[in-house]
Amino acid sequence: MEALLDLMRAAGDRITTSRRLLAGALLDRQGPITAEELCSLVQAQAPDISISTIYRNLEELARLEIVEHSHLGHGSAVYQLTSSAQAHLVCDGCGKTLVAPKELFEDLARQAAARYGFTVDPRHFAIQGYCQDCQTSGAPS
Ligand SMILES: [Zn+2]
Ligand SMILES: [Zn+2]
């Protein structure tokens, strides 16, 4: 927590109550979380803080590269701490989300760079497909 606040201070950020609570909620979650969920966690401790304050703070933390957003499916964007952000595989059948280790994208990243000079960002969008359980129960493959 202190490390995160130090990072925010170093970036010239003012540590307000809402930012401190927001950082705490992101750290506790240790995974992707929507702005709405973050808002209710923060409001449990400070009911006056509005969703627009949460969005403004998330934007600011994203600008400082402390937080990043990604899209796991058709719903709201989710936020995670950049220091621990991971890529995800999401099942179109049951909605299950799996963490995708970095190694999974190494070949793709290497080839995209070598052939097209393109830098792959596997974390911004999840890879969609079907999990093992859904395949065995007859979803399209
Ligand atoms: Zn986006
Ligand atoms: Zn599934």
Image (cartoon, rainbow, N blue to C red):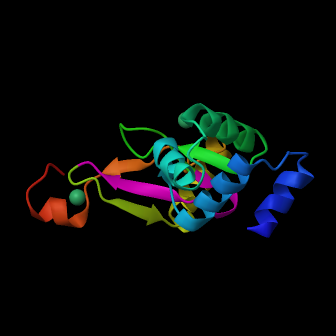
Q: Nearer the viewer, residue 59 or 71?
A: 59
Residue 24 occupies quadrant: bottom right
Q: Position of residue 14 (x, y in %)?
A: 85, 45
Res 30 visible = no
Q: Is residue 41 above or below residue 98?
A: above
Residue at 52% from the left image edge and 43% from the top image edge = 35
Residue at 73% from the left image edge and 50% from the top image edge = 17
Q: Nearer the viewer, residue 74 or 58?
A: 58
Q: Position of residue 60 (x, y in %)?
A: 74, 38
Total residue callouts: 0
Res 98 visible = yes
On whether residue 88 falls in the magenta region, the answer is yes
Q: Is residue 73 above or below residue 135?
A: above
Question: Ligand 2 quadrant?
Answer: bottom left
Residue at 40% from the left image edge and 56% from the top image edge = 89
Q: Position of residue 25 (x, y in %)?
A: 59, 59
Q: Residue furthest left?
A: 138
In the picture, measured across the screen, residue 71 lies left or right of residue 121, that is: left
Residue at 82% from the left image edge and 53% from the top image edge = 8
Q: Dividing the image into 4 quarters, which one contains the N terminus?
A: bottom right
In the picture, measured across the screen, residue 113 lies left or right of residue 91, that is: right
Q: Position of residue 82 (x, y in %)?
A: 67, 55
In the picture, measured across the screen, residue 130 lies left or right of residue 87, that is: left
Q: Is residue 114 above or below residue 116?
A: below
On whether residue 91 falls in the magenta region, the answer is yes
Q: Nearer the viewer, residue 116 or 29?
A: 29
Which region is colored magenta?
Answer: 80-92
In the picture, measured across the screen, residue 97 lies left or right of residue 26, that is: left
